[in-house]
Image: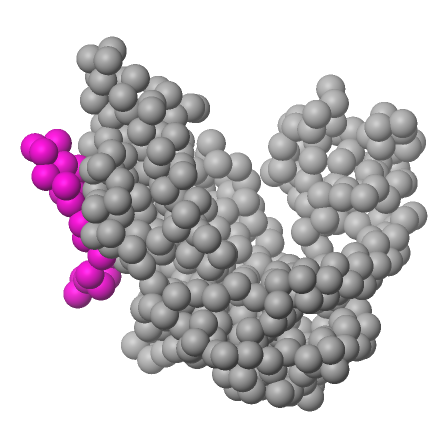
Amino acid sequence: MNVYDSHRMADTLAPEGFTETATPEDADLVILNTCHIREKAADKVYSEIGRIRELKEAAARDGRRMMIAVAGCVAQAEGKEIIRRAGAVDLVVGSQNYHRLPQMIARARHGERVVDTEFPVEDKFEVLAAPERSAIARRGISAFVTVQEGCDKFCTFCVVPYTRGAEVSRPVEKIVDEVKRLAQAGVREVTLIGQNVNAYHGAGPDGRPATLGNLLRRLAQVPGIFRLRYTTSHPRDVDNDLLAAHAELPALMPYVHLPVQSGSDRILSAMNRRHTRRDYLDVIARLRAARADLAFTSDFIVGFPGETESDFQATLTLVEEVGFAGAYSFMYSARPGTPAAEMSDQVPSEEKSERLQRLQAVIMRHQRNFNAGFAGRTIDVLLEKPGRLAGQLVGRSPYLQAVQVMAPKKLVGSIERVTVIEVGSNSLFGSLENQAPVLAAAGV
């Protein structure tokens, strides 16, 4: 979502004469777009501000003014504290307010230090400038599109409801219009994003709330869009219409990110996840029944307050039962202002670290097994960009695996049949169907 927001900030500032620079040293405005979901996120922001401050001072010595803005979720959480602690910062803009950047910059140019973190009455998506076609083309053939923001679930570990606000969804036709513009500029794959994307309930053409399944069906009809994905979803919001979309839409990729966080019902309850282990496994089974070739990834938190070795073992057995194609896993870290941060039975960091290593070893084993199963198979690959070798292109499989193949540059943006000839640690290597294998593609 921060990638998408960063692009939209650049789009918003383009009519003001701003263009993106390759290095911060050349910038007249540096925007630090931040995320607050990791531990010590604010500390990292202040450290980065210190580095940029030196560039700002060097620019001043050369007679050029550089401004520094802090945006995103740390900006939303810290607000005026950033201005108080970091004298080099000119403006602070919250995650729902970046459509106001031109006005904020104008005020900052007159010497005002601006903070705008109030949740606005107006919808930023109604105000944002449409991206220029050239800007879309520079960003490649895959694009993110925000369809939903905020979350009403209030998991006890999560800061999102406080920094992104309540769940809101964009109208179907607004999203369709944006995707049409992307397709016309050469985008071939769209990933729909939201903090809780399958809670999507934007207004449909008839004025009634649409489901994520409805939206996916509509987008599958946009000419030029070959592939659709969505992330991040919640197990409680996988409805029958989404299951049907997976069964019906060839453009909807068979790769679902479905965070579970823990395999222990006791910990899931303490997290306020509102689902049990059995509930989660039932959702997995229903999705697999809708489409047999689906693969799953997930999120896990280890060392949540009160987690015992027995609770952790329940997580390990869940990984074994589902057989995830990959997963993100983290040690629990307290987010200020969340209920879990106040829980008394915090797990020692050494235990959290040791459990994380064990969990990641199991996840990695399943991921390697999943990738190994593609050796010798012929798969559809959306070719995205030139690779590191001359004559090489890099693309993505339906399962988001990087695939490297020797192919002419003119095939960028097309879906080609590729036979996998080697499985690497992070990539698949292949040759175009009906073409002799090229070992150079595998770096051997």
Q: Which part of the image, by quadrant, shows the N terminus?
A: bottom left
Q: Is residue 153 above or below residue 366?
A: below
Q: What percent of the width, then of the height, locates residue 281?
A: 70, 82
Q: Can residue 30 be seen from the camera position used here?
A: yes
**Of residues 38 and 382, which is closer to you in this image?**
38
In the image, taking residue 248 as reference, residue 130 lies left or right, namely left
- For the C terminus, the image quarter is top right
Number of marks drawn: 0
Pinpoint residue 394: horizontal percent, then vertical percent: 69, 35
Q: Position of residue 400 (x, y in %)?
A: 68, 51
Farthest left residue in view:
110
Quarter occupied by residue 335: bottom left
The residue positioned 74% from the left and 27% from the top of the image is 392
Residue at the (20%, 13%) spot, across then down: 63
**What colouring style does the render use?**
one colour
Q: Is residue 274 above or below residue 18?
A: below
Can see residue 237?
no
Residue ID at (49%, 56%): 39
Which region is colored magenta?
102-127
Query: Could you tell me residue 65's position as x and y percent?
Result: 21, 22
Q: 221 left or right of 25?
A: right
Is-magenta flag for residue 56?
no
Residue placed most toward the observer, 252 or 223: 252
In the rendered structure, does residue 103 fall within the stretch colored magenta? yes
Which of 55 and 13 lies nearest the eye of the viewer? 55
- Picture quadrant of residue 132: top left
Residue at 70% over, 54% down? 398
